[in-house]
Image: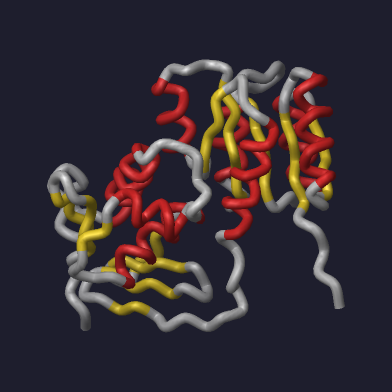
Amino acid sequence: MQSRSPRILVVDDEPTIVKTVQAYLEKEGYTVHTALDGPAALKAARAFWPDLIVLDIMLPGMDGLEVLRRLRQESDVYILMLTAKADETDKVVGLTVGADDYLTKPFSPRELVARVKAILRRGRGAGLSEPVLAFRRLRLEPDARRVWKDDRPVELTSIEFELLHALARHRGRVLSREQLIEQVWGYDYYGEERVVDVHIGHIRRKVEDDPANPTLIVTVRGAGYRFEDELT
């Protein structure tokens, strides 16, 4: 039985960009739906159930960041943000709210396709059973993609879970930003390594008693990050 092709929702208020991106993605075999404004994006996402959303920040009716916030209240869909601004603030805000990656305009359609492939590749291997990782404070259930802290559930985005899982699997070892990118985003990731720091900061706010003085995910200056929770 042949599996369905991944569904992608492309949201941008510039019809030319939408048509170009749609053509490139459909050429790769993806099923593509489109929307030209924020409200239409929410409606399409709820009706279409995409595997990934390419979402522009500057949208009429409702900006992309608000669309992202609302989607994150009800969905863990992969989201690739588009921004016409080179300002780091837009990128950081998008990642903090829950975007999985970002791409700055103008961009190459081939680069966008490469990013989409890298993001969707993270879902591969879902049929393989992975052991539960039980530590003194945290418990990770990879197959269910659930995290518990002191017997209380912790809500993480897909990227946050995968980063935490990568660190936990290598408890006590320092993983560089490059190693984390390879494990979570893939070898063909085009973006900046700073994306790791943004997501680590978000994870810390959810799992650390004092995010400013972390004890579970520690920074090793000049080297990377180390997971230090004790095994049970």
Instruction: Please tell me which residue lies in front, 10 or 71.
Output: 10
Instruction: Please tell me which residue lies in front, 29 or 160.
Output: 29
Question: Residue 148: percent from the left, percent from the top?
Answer: 36, 68
> Which residue is pictured at 56% across the width and 81% down the height?
128
Q: Is residue 75 left or right of residue 220?
A: right
* The N terminus, quarter of image: bottom right
Q: Name the quadrant containing residue 2.
A: bottom right
Question: Residue 159: percent from the left, percent from the top?
Answer: 47, 53
> Which residue is pictured at 62% across the width and 44% down the height?
114
Question: Residue 157: percent from the left, percent from the top?
Answer: 48, 52
Instruction: Please tell me which residue lies in front, 210 or 36.
Output: 36
Q: Can residue 155 be seen in this view?
A: no
> Which residue is pictured at 36% across the width and 55% down the height?
180
> Which residue is pictured at 38% across the width and 66% down the height?
165
* The C terminus, quarter of image: bottom left
Total numbered labels placed on residues in the image? 0
Q: How is the image coloured?
A: secondary structure
Q: Is residue 125 left or right of residue 209?
A: right
Question: Residue 39: percent from the left, percent from the top?
Answer: 74, 28
Q: Is residue 108 left or right of residue 223?
A: right
Q: Is residue 219 visible?
A: yes
